[in-house]
Image: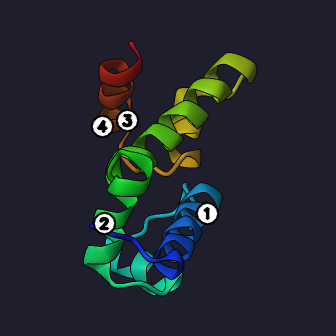
C-alpha cells in the first residue's frame, strides 16, 4: 500500500489519540472517525507505518504503563488494571504475565 502524505498525517493523529486516551475503550470505527480516515486504510496504514497492528500497539501501550506503575507506585494491581483501561483483572493479569513475565 502506498500511503499519501495526508493518510500518514491521519494515521499519526490516530496514534496520538490512542496514546493520549489509552485508558478509554475505543473501536477501530470510532478511532477512524476521530482521525478522519476510513477503517481499512487506518488498519493497513498503521501496520505499514509502525510495523504493528493497532490492537498490538494499544495493548503494548497499556502494559508498559501498567509495568511502570507497578514498579514506581504503591498502587494495587486492581487499581492499575482499571487505570490502564482493562475491566477484567483476570484478563489483565494473564495478559501481563504472558507478555511481560
Circle on res. 43:
2
Residue 18 picture location, percent across and down: 54, 61
Whole-angstrom CA distance, mark 3 to mark 1, is 23 Å
Q: Nearer the viewer, mark 1 or mark 4?
A: 1
Q: Within 10 angstroms of label 3, few (less than 14), some, or many (20 or more) residues? A: many
Question: Is the C-beta separation of discs 3 and 1 under 8 Å?
Answer: no
- Up the image or down, 68 lies above or below 31; here it is above
Question: Is the C-beta separation of discs 3 and 4 under 8 Å?
Answer: yes
Of all residues shown, which one is farthest toward the top? 101
Which residue has dot 4 on it? 91
Mark before the other along the chain sequence, 2 or 1: 1
Circle on res. 92:
3
* Residue visible at 42% across and 84% down in the picture: 37
Relative placement, left or right, of 76 versus 43 is: right
Mark before the other along the chain sequence, 1 or 4: 1
Q: Within 10 angstroms of label 4, few (less than 14), some, or many (20 or more) residues? A: few
Whole-angstrom CA distance, mark 2 to mark 1, is 15 Å
**Residue 54 visible in this rendered orientation of the protein:** no
Q: Within 10 angstroms of label 1, few (less than 14), some, or many (20 or more) residues? A: few
Whole-angstrom CA distance, mark 3 to mark 4, is 4 Å
Q: Within 10 angstroms of label 2, few (less than 14), some, or many (20 or more) residues? A: some
Residue 19 picture location, percent across and down: 60, 55
User: In terms of image quadrants, where is residue 41?
Assistant: bottom left
Which residue has dot 1 on it? 16
Mark before the other along the chain sequence, 2 or 3: 2
| Viewer-nearest residue: 30 or 93 | 30
Residue 88 picture location, percent across and down: 35, 44
| Viewer-nearest residue: 69 or 82 | 69
Residue 21 picture location, percent across and down: 59, 62
Relative placement, left or right, of 88 versus 13 is: left
Mark before the other along the chain sequence, 3 or 1: 1
Q: Nearer the viewer, mark 3 or mark 1?
A: 1
Amino acid at each position: 500500500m502506498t500511503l499519501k502524505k495526508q493518510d500518514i498525517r491521519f494515521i499519526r493523529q490516530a496514534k496520538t489519540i490512542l496514546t493520549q486516551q489509552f485508558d478509554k475503550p475505543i473501536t477501530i470505527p470510532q478511532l477512524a472517525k476521530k482521525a478522519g480516515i476510513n477503517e481499512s486504510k487506518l488498519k493497513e496504514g498503521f501496520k505499514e507505518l509502525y510495523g504493528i497492528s493497532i490492537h498490538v500497539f494499544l495493548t503494548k501501550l497499556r502494559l508498559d504503563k501498567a509495568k511502570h506503575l507497578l514498579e514506581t507506585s504503591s498502587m494495587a494491581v486492581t487499581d492499575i488494571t482499571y487505570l490502564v483501561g482493562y475491566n477484567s483483572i483476570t484478563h489483565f493479569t494473564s495478559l501481563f504475565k504472558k507478555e511481560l513475565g
